[in-house]
Image: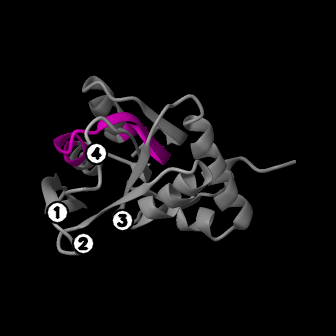
Amino acid sequence: MSKDLKEYVRTIPDFPEPGIMFRDVTSVLGDADGLALAVDSLRELLADVDYDVVVAPESRGFIFGVPIAYLDHKPFVPVRKKGKLPCETIEESYELEYGSATLEMHKDAICPGQKVVIIDDLIATGGTTEAIIRLVERLGGEVVRIAFVIELAGLDGRKKLESEGYQVSSAIIYEGK
């Protein structure tokens, strides 16, 4: 009998601080069956979606976004931290728990009217994803689905994105934070 994807996720209590249950995706990556199941699960979440391009943030988003793009024969667009992309970029800053961050995408990465799927390993508050959405939409793309391997439902990222009209799917949902 095959394992459930959740069984591949290692939970580390009290990391990075007391009371937090850290959901470690590296244990999924470290098992060939777990990695295959994660990619297959994401593809199932996208089975009914008509899309043109996969967008994902570094670094763990790349791990899951690239195989989806490859298997579905779609282009892949990387979203990177400021200063990492070599051509002309657009940028979007967003707030973190402690401070802020800036993401960039090549200015020519998305064509107006393209249907975009955003893939990432985990959704917590949704701040990173909101920044990616703003980048995609500034270039004229339409976000048609956002898919995650893991969702921390207690942090309300899905609620925030869905309230803004986006479709969110997750392979695993943990009720807490």
Dot label at residue 85:
2
Query: Does residue 83 appear anywhere in the picture?
Result: yes
- x, y (%) of residue 94? 15, 53
First in sequence: mark 3 or mark 4? 3
Of residue 167 and residue 13, the one placed in the foreground of this image is: 167
Check residue 135 for magenta coloring.
yes
Q: CA distance from mark 1 to mark 4?
A: 14 Å
> For numbered disc 3, what is the local secondary structure?
loop
- x, y (%) of residue 149? 52, 49
Dot label at residue 111:
4
Dot label at residue 58:
3
- x, y (%) of residue 166? 33, 29
Disc 3 marks a residue whose amino acid type is Glu
First in sequence: mark 3 or mark 2? 3
Q: Is residue 16 left or right of residue 138?
A: right
Q: In the rendered structure, which segment of residues is drawn in magenta?
A: 134-154
Q: CA distance from mark 3 to mark 1?
A: 15 Å
First in sequence: mark 3 or mark 1? 3
Local packing at callout 1 (Cα closer than 10 Å; few below 14, some 14-19, many 20+) is: some
Of residue 12 and residue 146, the one placed in the foreground of this image is: 146
Disc 2 marks a residue whose amino acid type is Leu
Proximity of marks 2 and 1: CB atoms separated by less than 8 Å: yes
> For numbered disc 1, what is the local secondary structure?
strand
Find residue 26 and report its image quarter.
bottom right
Instruction: Identify the residue at horizontal 56%, vertical 36% (top origin).
Output: 45
Q: Which residue is mark 1?
A: 89
Disc 4 marks a residue whose amino acid type is Cys
Disc 1 marks a residue whose amino acid type is Thr
